[in-house]
Amino acid sequence: MNAAVIVSLRIAASPQACFDAFVEDISLWWKPNGLFQLTPRGDGELRFEPGENGRLVTTLSNGHTFEIGRITHWAPGERLAFTWRQATFTPEQQTHVEVRFESVGDETRVTVEHRGWDAIPQEHLARHGFPLGPFQMRQAEHWRALLAALAEHLVASR
């Protein structure tokens, strides 16, 4: 699992504010993408259960809750890491997401690194048959759009 999608965006807010919005307001800024649905029924409403070993879950419109992953690193204002799986993954399949919050002057560079897609077979439903390179480019576009939505949320909530 060495292949990674890495996306960064500078946001006009403090690292702590970016971290807090990322974890506390994910249901407000998360934008579903039909190509990368978390479950066959869509993405639902995401939320983090905070702290080390907490969970990232989504609640679907039918009330069913799906665990996307477990938090593996929780450092408010600095770093968040968690496992990531889609509903179509087998129990042993998962990817890993790390989010870093780094102060750059009056802004914060938020970097998302999503690893492990090379362990998910190309023919898997989640990969849509894409070879790794094109798949990762599309995944990067999705994370870039999500970070832009996070930035918009932070500006709107001031």
Image (cartoon, rainbow, N blue to C red):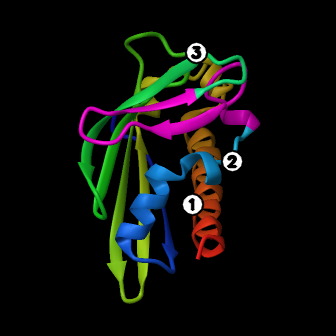
**Residue 38: percent from the left, percent from the top?**
61, 28
Residue 139 within the magenta-colored segment of the rendering: no
Disc 2/disc 1 C-alpha distance (Å): 10 Å
**Residue 145: percent from the left, percent from the top?**
65, 57
Question: Which residue range is magenta in the image?
Answer: 34-58
Q: How many marks?
A: 3
Q: Nearer the viewer, residue 6 or 64?
A: 64
**Element marked by disc 2:** loop
Disc 3/disc 2 C-alpha distance (Å): 20 Å
Instruction: Give residue 31's mark.
Output: 2
Q: Is residue 20 above or below residue 82?
A: below
Q: Is residue 44 above or below residue 29?
A: above
Instruction: Give residue 88's mark.
Output: 3
Q: Circle 1: is it few (<14), some (14-19), or many (20+) Cα within 10 Å?
A: many
User: Can residue 6 be spotted in the picture?
Assistant: no
**Element marked by disc 1:** helix
Looking at the rendered structure, the kind of residue marked 1 is Leu
**Element marked by disc 3:** loop
CB-based contact (under 8 Å), mark 2 and mark 1: no
Residue 40 within the magenta-colored segment of the rendering: yes
The residue drawn where x is 60% and y is 26% is 59
Looking at the rendered structure, the kind of residue marked 2 is Lys
CB-based contact (under 8 Å), mark 1 and mark 3: no
Instruction: Give residue 147's mark.
Output: 1
- Residue most extreme to the right: 34
Comes first in the chain, label 2 or label 1: 2
Horizontal side of 99 relative to 21 (left or right) equals: left
Q: Quadrant of the N terminus?
A: top left
